[in-house]
Image (cartoon, rainbow, N blue to C red):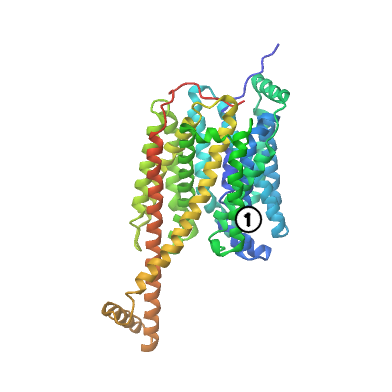
Amino acid sequence: MAVTRAPNPWLIAVVVAIATFMEVLDTTIANVALPYMAGGLGVSEDEASWVITTYLVSNAIALTASAFLVQRIGRKRFFMACLALFTVSSVLCALAWNLQALLAFRVLQGIAGGGMVPVSQSILADSFPPAKRGQAFALFGVAVVVAPVVGPTLGGWLADNISWHWCFLINGPVGAFAVVAIAVLLRETPAQVEERRRLQQEGRRFDIIGFALVATFLGALEVLCDRGLEDDWFGSGFIVAVAIVCGAAFLLMIPWELRQRNPVIDLRMVASRQFGACFLVMLATGAILLATTQFLPQLVQQDLGYTATWAGLVLSPGGLVTMAMMFITGRMLTRIQPKYLIVTGATLIAVSMYQLTAVYGDVGFWYLAQSRMLLGLGLPLIFLSITAASYDGIRPDKIDQASALINVARNTGGSLGVALVSNVLTHREQFHQSRLVEHAIPSSSAYQETLRQVTEFFAGHGSAPLQAKGQAIGWIGQQLQAQASFLAYIDAFWVLMLISLAAVPLALTLRNVKLGGKAPVAH
């Protein structure tokens, strides 16, 4: 009898990484293209921003159901179904005839994407022997960490030079290739088939009420984070209603899930010292990754006059460092305890954020790029170490759920981080502007001297005296606004630095794991 040769696990890893990269890319690729979408669909930019919200909400909800569905229908079938739905819905997004259709297709895209990422980790764990899993997870980590960085740059270039439709159409050929490759390369082991049959014979039921409560809580939380600032938080009746629904779902979810034999979310696992600490650290990591990826380009474009291309290039050196560090970290995990790598990574990120608290009007490109490179050193140390530490002590039948929850933490942390930094920027800019205005008054001798010098400057360039004075007053107002903005960004970077430092004591609570041993594998 001919023996079927197993496919090269690195081929599987590359295909899985491509699929994961494509999914995570879609969390940020549409952000900078919103003005083009609004114009093309004849709606306001505020209405078009629901393109982002619907994807994040449906993505977070789907993550929680992925573990049960994998056990019921098998990892390969589930992954291929999600990948196919993601590809088709991406093409439909590009072909959407109005905003309502686009939002409906984005919901489908988010549901499919939410199932792909956690299953990707389980596929890699099954495909590689224990000694090489660190390198496989490093490739996965590159996709998850680098994709949000590439998203805004790629989306902006496509929207500027071709059309916003290509932000979605680009997934078509990539997704089709990945579906075919997974169908050919990925095979279920006899142990996986047997485990699935056993679970089906047990008649394990889906916790539909728990899922509804968890979905309502996560969905409402995503809406709060994404829409709160734009809708004036609790000054909006809509936001108040969403907050009440979110709180009620959370309070009902806890007792219900604790009483279930097979809950959608195992709250006891989340409350355990090892997994709970990993969950919180991943929340912080997601917040820092997405917040810095979104607001550093915004800073250099608004206050330093960078183009979209140069704003993307500020992030690029950090992305290259991250890719290299992922593979180095994969090797380090075979020799160094994850908790020490997390502490090192969190410290490096804190130093990176501290460097950014020194931004000013003449800060150079390489200063910003170097701070991003320092961030690129720290993120892989945290990301891969959490993956290793979070699985420690988890039963094999809970691994898929653990993977899903870690990804929920990353997604939710990203939304919370963006919401937090948005609020810090808005309120602190108002605060700094009001304080600076106190010194820009006619009775101030410093103000009068500045006004005189700037008026003389404009007069020397051909403006009439009255016109020159008006130009001088306008210039002083612009400078005041710019300084208020810089000070607000500095405050935001201080907040992110404190969030990073908060991960240090959490990491030290983790217990030691067996280095180079067999990593748990989901079935």
Left or right: residue 185 compared with residue 387:
right
From this view, report whether residue 95 is shown above or below residue 250. Answer: below
Where is residue 483 drawn, in percent x and y? 37, 66
From this view, report whether residue 314 is shown above or below residue 340. Answer: below
Q: Which SS class for mark 1?
A: helix
From this view, report whether residue 390 is shown above or below residue 224. Answer: above
Comparing 251 with 164, the one in front is: 251
Q: How many marks?
A: 1
Q: Please identify the residue farthest to the top as the structure is shown.
A: 1
Which residue shows up at 56% across the image and 36% down it? 267
Comparing 288 with 308, the one in front is: 288
Comparing 266 with 173, the one in front is: 266
Which residue shows up at 61% across the image and 24% down it? 7
**Residue 307 is at least partly visible in this image:** yes
Where is residue 137 drawn, in percent x and y? 51, 32
Where is residue 97 drawn, in percent x and y? 73, 58
Q: Quadrant of the C terminus?
A: top right
**Residue 180 is at least partly visible in this image:** no
Amino acid carrying mark 1 in the image: Val
Comparing 227 with 101, the one in front is: 227
Q: Quadrant of residue 201?
A: top right
Where is residue 519 drawn, in percent x and y? 51, 24
Left or right: residue 155 compared with residue 83:
left
Q: Quadrant of residue 340?
A: top left
Which residue shows up at 51% across the image and 50% down it? 416
Left or right: residue 294 compared with residue 462:
right
Q: Quadrant of the N terminus?
A: top right
Q: Quadrant of residue 172?
A: top right
Residue placed under numbered mark 1 in the picture: 51
